[in-house]
Image: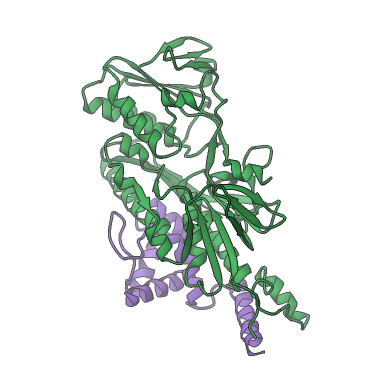
Chain colours: A green, B purple
């Protein structure tokens, strides 16, 4: 007789309670426990590997991800800036599969939480005991008047990885010296808070490297302040004097519309004729999560900070950009960190693994120019009903070049580390 | 119910671990803490911009973390991580990474 670990503990204390009552809640074994993970990015790939590790005989993990080759959004700005090749930010799932995770290269089309079943676009149905939902963000196509999914071919967003990233670089390469580049930036929350400003830096680096210093990059921001602002602005003045014009809402009065045919951007103050426009639209949780009723009015999915379990369904975990992460930013590092908390909770529930208190960490590195890299980060715990920041840090103006170079080396190490953690 | 007894022991250990993770350089606890490290420090032990911590002598491992914790060693990321680690946590991590080195 073996034991059904699914009924054994949903947590250490529940198990202890059953023992105290002198009647352990064991039952006859059934099939292996089933876990489905939706989304093969920093959250989902990490979660799948960590849940499966050394537990192949107890838990069957299926990772649902349409792409066979996954290009990371993180470091895609470095591709735009010419610091990384596209190949170097693209990864396969070969080692994920070899590590005991079953791969379903298809799109998840529906979650039936009552039946505990995921349906794939191709019609396949996957039953689960626990589900991890890590779909990332969807773009709100209607959040910028005049812009649309079709318009993204002319005014790219490049805020989801892959073809759009290459398109953005091609558009940048075609900008003539003296033409204006406009970037529109949404209000919080959105994926990768410092991302727009690192991207501005990489635009400027490319322009400067190719002698196009008469081009101005105008940033129409929905926010009055942004991540690492002091060090970004110091860096722009130092490396790219006069090339970056950042406007907060008081300066532009609000983004009114873009016109992809005329290549213009209109604010309350003016209409700007542009050689290139990068629209970063507002975002919300991936559709699969919203359709499953996991999101709240914010468009993102609230979670229990002790475990990353959805507050609306304890059998479902929502990690990464799709969740409401408390004080954590929407970053790959955060998603990877949250994945480990969810993985431990799932292993505890399905395989009786010891569960320890949730620990979270994040660091976001941003490259301003060659060898000048800045960072922001912190550590977090479950506290006051949310993921709460305990200690945080951020780069300061006036730091020595050696420290900034060290940050850059560190960011390369992090990229190698997190992608090995995700993809093996 | 040998399985039940074993599991009961496991639960008691887990409860003890929750109450006082200081317990010992317990493997499961070390693995749990180490998950935080592997976002940056490659489990392969390779150096690609961030130093390897695989297979380090335990005393050196602990000395490095303590130096970050008391801020005598520079690196704001590591100082922030080390601040959250007790002496027992550091010992568990040191044992875990030392063992990982011997497995390779």
Foreground residue among A69 and A209: A69
In this rendering, does residue A361 appear at all? Answer: no
On the image, the x and y values in percent for residue B101 come to 33, 73
Q: How many marks?
A: 0
A340 in relation to A88, above or below: below
Say which quadrant the N terminus of chain B sits in: bottom right
Q: Is residue A338 left or right of residue A67?
A: right
Q: Residue furthest right?
A: A21
Instruction: Give the farthest residue toward the bottom.
Output: B2
Task: Return the x and y of residue A101 as percentages of the image width and height.
Answer: 47, 63
Q: Nearer the viewer, residue B55 or A349?
A: A349
Residue plotted at (29% across, 22% down): A174
- x, y percent for residue A121: 56, 47
Kindly identify the residue that appears in the image at 49 percent across and 13 percent down.
Answer: A266
Q: Residue at x 21, y 25 (%)?
A: A210
Report the front residue among B3 and A268: B3
Q: Quadrant of residue A373?
A: top left
Q: Relative to A68, is B34 above or below?
A: below
Q: Does A423 sit left or right of A290 as displayed?
A: left
In the rendered image, which quarter is residue A77 located in? top left
The answer to which image quadrant residue A295 occupies is top right
Q: Residue furthest front?
A: A123
Q: Residue at x 32, y 72 (%)?
A: B55
Residue B43 horizontal/vertical position (percent) = 36, 65
């Amino acid at each position: 007789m073996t034991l059904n670990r699914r009924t054994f503990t949903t947590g250490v204390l529940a198990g202890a309670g059953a023992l105290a009552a002198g009647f352990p809640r064991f039952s006859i074994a059934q099939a292996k426990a089933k876990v489905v993970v939706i989304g093969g990015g920093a959250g989902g790939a990490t979660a799948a590997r960590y849940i499966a590790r050394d537990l192949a005989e107890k838990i069957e993990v299926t990772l649902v991800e349409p792409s066979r080759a996954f290009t990371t959004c993180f470091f895609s700005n470095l591709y735009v800036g010419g610091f990384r090749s596209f190949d170097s930010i693209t990864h396969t799932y070969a080692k994920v599969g070899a590590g005991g995770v079953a791969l379903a290269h298809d799109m998840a089309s529906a979650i039936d939480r009552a039946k505990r079943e995921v349906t794939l676009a191709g019609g396949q149905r996957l039953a689960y005991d626990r589900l991890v939902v890590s779909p990332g963000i969807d773009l709100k196509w209607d959040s910028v008047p005049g812009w649309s999914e079709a318009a993204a071919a002319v005014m790219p967003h490049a805020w989801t990885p892959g073809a759009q990233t290459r398109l953005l670089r091609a558009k940048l390469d075609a900008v003539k010296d003296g033409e204006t580049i406009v970037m529109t930036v949404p209000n919080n929350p959105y994926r990768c808070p410092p991302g727009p400003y690192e991207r501005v830096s990489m635009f400027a680096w490319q322009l400067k490297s190719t002698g196009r210093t008469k081009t101005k990059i105008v940033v129409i921001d929905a926010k009055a302040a942004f991540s690492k602002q002091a060090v970004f602005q110091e860096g722009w003045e130092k490396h790219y004097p006069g090339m970056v014009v950042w406007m907060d809402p008081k300066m532009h009065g609000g983004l009114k519309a873009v016109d992809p045919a005329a290549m213009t951007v209109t604010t309350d103050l003016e209409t700007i004729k542009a050689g290139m426009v990068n629209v970063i639209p507002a975002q919300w949780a991936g559709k699969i999560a919203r359709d499953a009723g996991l999101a709240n009015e914010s468009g993102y999915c609230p979670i229990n900070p002790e475990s990353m379990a959805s507050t609306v369904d304890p059998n479902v975990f929502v990690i990464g950009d799709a969740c409401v992460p408390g004080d954590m930013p929407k970053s790959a590092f955060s998603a990877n960190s949250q994945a480990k908390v969810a993985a431990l909770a799932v292993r505890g529930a399905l395989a009786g693994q010891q569960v320890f208190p949730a620990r979270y960490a994040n660091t976001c590195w941003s490259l301003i120019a060659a060898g000048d890299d800045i960072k922001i980060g912190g550590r977090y715990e479950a506290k006051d009903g949310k993921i709460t920041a305990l200690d945080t840090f951020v780069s300061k103006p006036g730091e020595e070049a050696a420290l900034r170079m060290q940050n850059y080396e560190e960011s390369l190490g992090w990229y190698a580390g997190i992608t090995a953690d995700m993809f093996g | 119910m040998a399985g039940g007894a074993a599991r009961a022991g496991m639960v008691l250990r887990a409860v003890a671990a929750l109450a006082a993770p200081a317990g010992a350089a317990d493997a499961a606890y070390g693995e749990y803490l180490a998950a935080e490290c592997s976002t940056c420090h490659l489990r392969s032990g390779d150096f690609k911009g961030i130093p390897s911590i695989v297979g380090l002598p335990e005393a050196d491992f602990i000395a490095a973390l303590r130096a970050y914790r008391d801020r005598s060693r520079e690196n704001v990321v590591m100082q922030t991580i080390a601040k959250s680690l007790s002496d027992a946590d550091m010992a568990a991590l040191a044992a875990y990474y030392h063992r990982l080195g011997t497995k390779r």
